[in-house]
Amino acid sequence: MSGLIAPVAARAREAAVVLALATRATKDAALEAMAVALLANTAAILAANADDIVAAAADGTPEHLLDRLRLDADRVAGMAQGLREVAGLPDPIGTVLRGSTLANGLELRQVSVPFGVVGVIYEARPNVTADAAGICLKSGNAVLLRGSSSALNSNRAIIEVLRSAAAGAGVPADVIQLVPGEGHEAVKELMRARGLVDVLIPRGGAGLIRSVVEESTVPVIETGVGNCHVYVDAEADLEMALAIVLNSKTHRTSVCNSAESLLVHEAVAAEFLPKVVAALRAADVTIHGDEAFGAYDGVEKATEEDWDTEYLSLDISAAVVPDLSSAIAHIRAHSSGHTEAIVTGSQAAARRFTAEVDAAAVMVNASTRFTDGGEFGFGAEIGISTQKLHARGPLGLPEMTSTKYVVTGDGHTR
Amino acid sequence: MSGLIAPVAARAREAAVVLALATRATKDAALEAMAVALLANTAAILAANADDIVAAAADGTPEHLLDRLRLDADRVAGMAQGLREVAGLPDPIGTVLRGSTLANGLELRQVSVPFGVVGVIYEARPNVTADAAGICLKSGNAVLLRGSSSALNSNRAIIEVLRSAAAGAGVPADVIQLVPGEGHEAVKELMRARGLVDVLIPRGGAGLIRSVVEESTVPVIETGVGNCHVYVDAEADLEMALAIVLNSKTHRTSVCNSAESLLVHEAVAAEFLPKVVAALRAADVTIHGDEAFGAYDGVEKATEEDWDTEYLSLDISAAVVPDLSSAIAHIRAHSSGHTEAIVTGSQAAARRFTAEVDAAAVMVNASTRFTDGGEFGFGAEIGISTQKLHARGPLGLPEMTSTKYVVTGDGHTR
């Protein structure tokens, strides 16, 4: 471990000890102060962001990425609003999750506690900086933030504002810190900082997540890759199926809970395929189809790779399957474990699909787009876990905690 | 990935899909059949074990390790009894952990599901083979077992018996498999089998656990290292303190929840130290003491290393601290996050200690030895987690599960 992360993490640990003992009132006051400070410092934040935009544009960054990087007064107000919403949520710390009095009179309580220090590695959007800081603060965790280098000026400005507001409200500024250094070296150190950093959450593309998962010795919560399927069953209401396919694919293409693949039971293929092909094409979606879909105009031939591709664009792979078992087998072979949907009027098919498909979320007669902390009513999320350990699905405040057993006796020995 | 693990893991995944859908009745019948088969095959298991014992003795293995390796009819009966106890526990699968109807009418359920395939890497004791197989089967997980090479014949015999009994009860034999190969190569492959193996649980010494944590790309549940402290506060009942110190240290020395370090508030040092030194020496405990303890006969001088040492023997480090804050600071610096105990009559001291000490379990006026799945009433445990992610403390059946959101609508789109 060279010198980049250790001192930052040590300060975070000290600050985390204080934050872990802070009352909800103190934490909420800090979040409110952070929201007020973001609004008050909008001009300075936008000026820093303008520097990032100019540099990125000069580097030839395409417009859709510039748009993700760009802040304006509305987006800053949105960050402030997000912090206020987190302040309004229940404190996830100190919840008694289990409790009992044992046969020998020992009193057992399992209580939620913060992790300690959380590292968040993310790409582009500078609003993640405020969102992650807010969720970590409310859950009693110090956070080390590592955004995209293209957003460095923006993130620096936001973090400075948040730190000084937190300190003014009685929370140590070091609960929110930027990971120093610009190259990959700092990220590498962060991933090896076991014992200093308790949890690492990568948010971004598949490449970033894979590299963190492969290289990190710090426990990781894997987020985000979504190769989501919609399966239209033999007993589906085909109008409902059409609406769900279109919404799942086209409502917003760049997000992990959008659909990337369509499976149709052969019993309804003759009726459904013309309709869904026409509707998808009318919505500018490119269909990468199997032989059955290939019979329709404008459908491209799917390659083996298509079945595993998270397009994040107006593309969808599509196949006809002979039965429910084949649909489940296809999904098992190609799913990323994010969200899988069935459209069916059959109770038996729904029951089998929800039991046998292995994913963070399984939808029955609903769009894949509903897998989301906000939609689930969690109020805030720091990402969507696609791993099975610790938390699976949207990561809200309760998912950002660990536990401690407190055992009280009056001289008990074995 | 060379060829050792991939085929075994692939068979485990197939079997896990079937096991995940098995009812409690099927799983309990399999556990009962496994118990009956262990008893019926005691002679064959003991013969295989005798081969291991002869080989280990020829290698010069010391007697206390031979004892861990040795099976007899009672120990085999104990394994069978353990499987029956697991059968008697509630099914951890299919529990609805959260559920609500969202504002838009979507029905949300969070349900417990198996991980899928669990790898267990462990040392010596062959009874772990049956315990781990039973807990994994009941929690719907296929298990890949990697015991000590010195126990290979015993483990092979036990696993063959368990597999054939499971198959006879309608559960695929491949839910229980031995990791093939004898060298480190297979373990290395197991640790890199991300995507094939869902969770890895190392059980054993600090070296084994560290190497798994460092090298594994499969998510790990870290178990077991316990540098547990007992802090005797200024307001402790000193008779109670003496009993708790002795029980925590001497009840069983080779286990992770035994005490390894004693801290005494200076206000009670003059009265308590002579008593505790005498009592510990009478129990053959070697005290590695600071200056204050050094004033007593037979106390060895502690080195810096002693404060971080998990002795697992009749040794204890011991120091006098000026106040509660110093005790907490010392524990924070040296704790392995397993179990920490305070003996005090002060409500304020207990409250501070339980809030500020960061460990899987914090004991107030009770022996550190109570951190145990059996003592906590969990009925069975596969280890004690000292990490903060997923599960902290004894790992019972509910800790061997993941979750899935099942979301039901009637054509919901965003």
Image (cartoon, coloured by chain):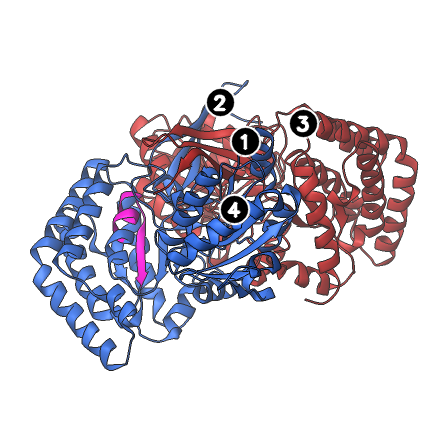
Chain colours: A red, B blue
Q: Residues within 10 Å of mark 2 (few under 14, many from 20)?
A: many
Marks 4 and 1, Cα distance to the nearest angstrom? 62 Å
In which image quadrant can residue B54 be found?
A: bottom left
Residue A370's label in the rendered image is 1
Residue A31: x, y in percent? 75, 30
Task: Answer yes or no: is residue B385 visible.
Answer: yes
Residue B300 appears left or right of A6:
left
Q: Which residue sits at x=37%, y=53%?
A: B250
Q: Which mark is residue B272?
A: 4
Whether the residues at callouts 4 and 3 have beta carbons within 8 Å, the answer is no
User: Closer to the camera, B125 or A66?
Assistant: B125
The label on residue A24 is 3
Disc 3 marks a residue whose amino acid type is Arg
- Which residue lies under the disc numbered 2? B106
| Residue numbers of the magenta segment | B133-146
SS at mark 4 in the image: helix
Name the kind of residue labelled 4 in the image. Answer: Phe
Residue B258, relative to residue B214: is it above or below? Answer: above
Mark identifier at residue B225: none
Rendered location of residue A341, percent (x, y): 45, 36
Q: Viewer-proximal residue, B258 or B152?
A: B258
The x and y percentages for residue A209 are 59, 54
* Quadrant placement of the C terminus of chain B: top right
- For the point 43% across and 66% down, which residue is it? B208
Which secondary structure, mark 2? loop
- What's the CA distance linking mark 3 and mark 2? 31 Å
Residue sitting at x 70%, y 54%: A9
Q: Cα distance, mark 2 to mark 1?
A: 9 Å
